[in-house]
Amino acid sequence: MQDSERRQALADFLKTRRSRLAPEAVGLPRGVRRRTPGLRREEVAQLAHIGTTWYTWLEQERDIHVSVDVLDSLASALMLTPDERRHLFTLAEQALPTDNPPFEEKISPIIERFIDNLGDIPCYVLGRRWDRIAWNAAACALFEDFS
């Protein structure tokens, strides 16, 4: 595959993965006006902790080289499956790291018990991507069933 074809394939892959994610799925507000389905470029960049310009250049098929850390962040932000993650690394011509499994946020058992013991007081915990990682029954009754 030629370099220009690879960059186009990478851009197309990122666009399709971005378009399939609803803002609510990653803990972002939907907003009033959306011209594009799924997440905006700025939202993906924010979730991946990278610059919006850098992410935009990837989707514009610019000749830039992406680090393993940036690819890991993008894979996490776009909620890629292991196969999709592998494909992302292949398109970016980077070796898939074997020693770093995808980041999964967890809360301590103490916090979990605390939330459960709040009774009728609704409570939920947001992760680094603003997704809900823990909640109690009262929060589900008041807001929605988060499971």
Image (tube, grey):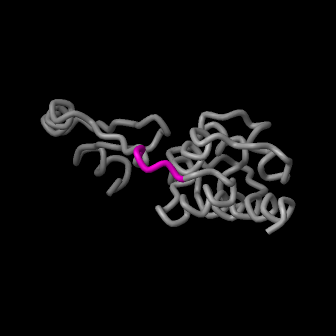
The residue range painted magenta reads 96-100
Within the magenta stretch, is there residue 9? no
Q: Residue at x 50, y 45 (%)?
A: 27
* Relative image position of residue 8 (x, y in whole percent): 81, 62
Dominant secondary structure (helix, strand or loop) of the stretch shown in magenta: loop
Residue 10 as seen in the image, left or right of residue 4: left
| Most foreground residue, 102 or 63 | 63
* Relative image position of residue 33 (x, y in whole percent): 74, 51
Q: Is residue 140 above or below residue 111?
A: below
| Most foreground residue, 11 or 45 | 11
Q: Is residue 125 above or below residue 5?
A: above
Image quadrant holding the C terminus, namely bottom left
Residue 85, quarter of picture: bottom right
| Most foreground residue, 132 or 47 | 47
| Most foreground residue, 23 or 11 | 11
Q: Residue at x 15, y 30 (%)?
A: 110
Q: Residue at x 28, y 51 (%)?
A: 141
Q: How many marks?
A: 0
* Relative image position of residue 38 (x, y in whole percent): 65, 58
Q: Residue furthest bottom?
A: 1
Q: Residue at x 55, y 64 (%)?
A: 84
Image quadrant holding the N terminus, namely bottom right
Residue 52, quarter of picture: top right
Residue 77 as seen in the image, left or right of residue 62: left
* Relative image position of residue 25 (x, y in whole percent): 50, 54
Residue 19 as seen in the image, left or right of residue 102: right
